[in-house]
Amino acid sequence: MNVNDILSISRTGLNGLQNNLDIVANNVANSNTVGFKNRDTSFTDLLENSTTSQDVNVENGQQNKMGMTTGLATHQQSINFSQGSLRNTDSPYDLAISGKGFFGVRGSDGQLYLTRNGDFTRDANGNVVDQAGRKLDIQATIPENQWPQGTVSIGQTGQITIEQNGRSTQVGSIVLYQPTEPQDLQAVGNNLYRVQGGTLNSSLNGANGLGTIEQYHLENSTTDLADAMSNMILTQRAYSLNSRVLQSTDDMLGTINEFSN
């Protein structure tokens, strides 16, 4: 192993650790975000193969024949879709899913996004919307802007009923979605997901296993703050050690250059 190999190993280590720091910091920042699913990162060593040390290209994951690792690479970034705990609220439009389904919300462009964030409200036009104004996907039997005044009840299957003067009116049903494969979901920011390929099942086509809707509840973030902070501290220490190796190697190169001159 020569000095250039050490520089390459340190560089891949710094890149991988910075990637992990970004993900952990995002998990920490969203520890109180409704319905947030924390991200995990796994790493792999860049190991030996039959190429020569002169042929090594660490950034492309190629390896040497020296029986030593040539660096660190991010193997996979995954989203932990485990169920978050539920907390009680006093708003009839606070909803949580107990199960594997997702709410569907649509922006002004009509694009469908999936989310576990059930923090909804009614806007000035009577639509059920999230905090950014995206409309909750509802199979309405009565247009939302024509719903009667009264007490709103949302059943576990998503049926919306409004009670007024002893009379109950069913006004629609909330649609739940679930991709056939969780890996088909792409996070697009703001606690939203989009399906990339694959099949999207929904309660509209009678899909099973979507879970139940719990009114007057919100789902907590799945970020374990203690674990995330511990992970951040360990990653920062590893990053600092890699930086020192890089600095020491640079100092060695400087000394070598001085002697060669």
Image (cartoon, helix red, strand yellow):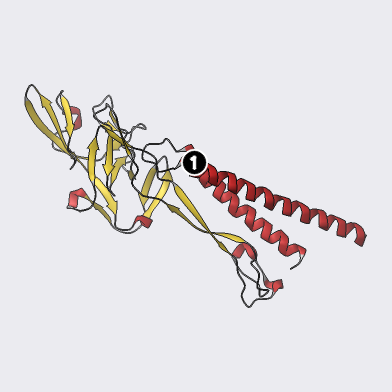
Q: Is residue 76 among what the camera can see?
A: yes
Count the marks.
1
Query: Is residue 18 placed above or below 126 in the rendered structure?
Result: below
The quadrant of the picture occupied by the N terminus is bottom right
Quarter occupied by residue 199: bottom left
- Residue drawn at x 25%, y 40% is 137
Q: Which amino acid is tagged 1?
A: Ala
Residue 226 position, x and y percent, is 49, 41
Q: Position of residue 171 (x, y in %)?
A: 14, 34
Q: Residue furthest top?
A: 165
Residue picked out by circle 1 = 226
Q: Residue at x 84, y 55 (%)?
A: 254
Indicate whether 93 appears above or below 112.
above
- Who's the residue at 39% across and 40% down the image? 221
In this rendering, position of residue 204 left or right of residue 12? left
Residue 73 versus residue 130: which sits nearer the camera? 73
- Quarter in which the C terminus is drawn: bottom right
Please give left or right for residue 97 compared with residue 139 in the image: right
Residue 5 in picture, x, y percent from top left: 72, 64
**Disc 1 element:** helix
Neighbor class of circle 1 (other Cα within 10 Å; few <14, some 14-19, many 20+) is few
Q: Position of residue 105 (x, y in %)?
A: 30, 40
Location of residue 134 with respect to 101 vertically, above or below? above
